Image (spheres, grey):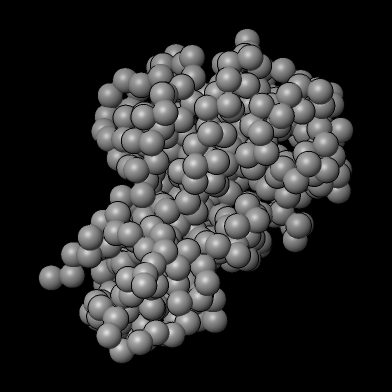
Amino acid sequence: MAPRKVLAGARVVLPTGIVDGGRVLVEGARIAGSGPADAEIIDVSGHWLVPGFVDLHNHGGGGASFTSGTVEEVLKGVHTHRLHGTTTVVASTVTGDMDGLAQRAGLLSELAEQGDIAGIHFEGPFISPCRKGAHSEELLRDPDPAEVRKLIDAARGRAKMVTLATELPGGIASVRLLAEHGVIAAIGHTDATYEQTREAIDAGATVATHLFNAMPALGHRTPGPIAALLEDERVTVELINDGTHLHPASLELAFRHAGAGRVAFITDAMDAAGFGDGRYMLGPLEVEVADGVARLVEGGSIAGSTLTLDRAFQRAVTIDRLPVEDVVAALSANPARLLGMDDKVGSLEPGKDADLVILDADFGIKGVMRRGEWVVEPQLG
């Protein structure tokens, strides 16, 4: 028989709301609906119990890169984020030459097939030189559908998302191609107008890559992509809630206008997440991390983040004063639904993977379980 555990007494965040003094039964790797009285009882009174976090957009951590590291290094980065409550992670690449990206897709697809990552996100090379951020300009290219297809094929069915500047030649055709193949088309690193963004959404784009960042600012005469992405109910907006990428008022604007059901918190993390300050490489570009903020050595552009999703959670509820259940949706249910994985992860419901996080009253990590196994043993004293 599979081992059974009952986590009892916590404030449990369920899709239907918060249950005080709730119970979650874990049987083997799954959450169960009911079980025998002889199950191991774990008293988590005075704590929060929430589903494991799902990160749509993540380039690495723990000193390891998803964009260039070996299998062992990628697994190290994945484990680093698991220690911070992210039980499901999509590995993101950065702009590179097409052959190199195809090779990287092959390596990452093997890890996806093994269940170590949830899939692959290609961020670049199909982005605007005007909004390149921490991407190498000489390697950028227009989103030719044939080249987009090359990356999808290299990922062997494990491509989850591609970020594009959809206003570029081939952009709309590429969005349609992605939609036809069940891959999320994300609008980002874009210089699109409001009208061009609406055209891309109508063609099938459903995600805004790190809304507000690497796109034109919201204007009263030229509203640009931000207004189009916020107003359309078909779009989920990514937000990097680290206190650097977004002003709290921008975060509030996104939540108010899009609603909690259309927000996905992401890390956009690079190698330094969970590791420390210093010099790193992001693709071919050198990055300096100082006081937890990553910037390109040449030019000073923000180069991803050092964020982990437990910090995004804690900031959202203690500084931004967002409702806990809305934050849980943004960290778990919404990204799981986007990935087509909400039958397995994203909420604490019977039949789903036993992926859960124990938080103390101040929303600090006190335990992490993935598929019924403790990644962080409960620290409940």
Q: Is residue 374 above or below residue 109?
A: below
Residue 76 in the image: x percent, y percent? Answer: 34, 35
Q: Residue at 55% across / 62% down in the picture?
A: 344
Query: What is the residue that sits farthest to the left in this orientation?
Result: 381
Q: Position of residue 116 (x, y in %)?
A: 46, 43
Q: Is residue 148 left or right of residue 130?
A: right
Q: Quadrant of residue 263?
A: bottom right
What is the tally of numbered marks visible in this picture? Answer: 0
Q: Is residue 17 visible?
A: yes
Where residue 296 appears, as percent x and y from the top left, is: 43, 21
Q: For the point 76% across and 57% down, which residue is it? A: 234
35 lies above or below 334: below
> Does residue 340 appear left or right of residue 304 in this picture?
right
Q: Is residue 301 visible?
A: no
Q: Which residue is at the front of the view, 254 or 261?
A: 261
Q: Position of residue 152 (x, y in %)?
A: 70, 31
* Residue pictured at 39% horizontal, 84% vertical: 35
The C terminus: image quadrant: bottom left
Residue 112's place in the image compared with 54, above or below, is: above
Quadrant including the N terminus: bottom left
In the rendered image, the vertical position of residue 117 relative to residue 22, given as above or below: above
Residue 341 quadrant: bottom right
Q: Residue furthest top?
A: 138
For the view shown, which residue lies furthest in the front direction?
1
At horizontal 73% and vertical 24% (from top left) the residue drawn is 150
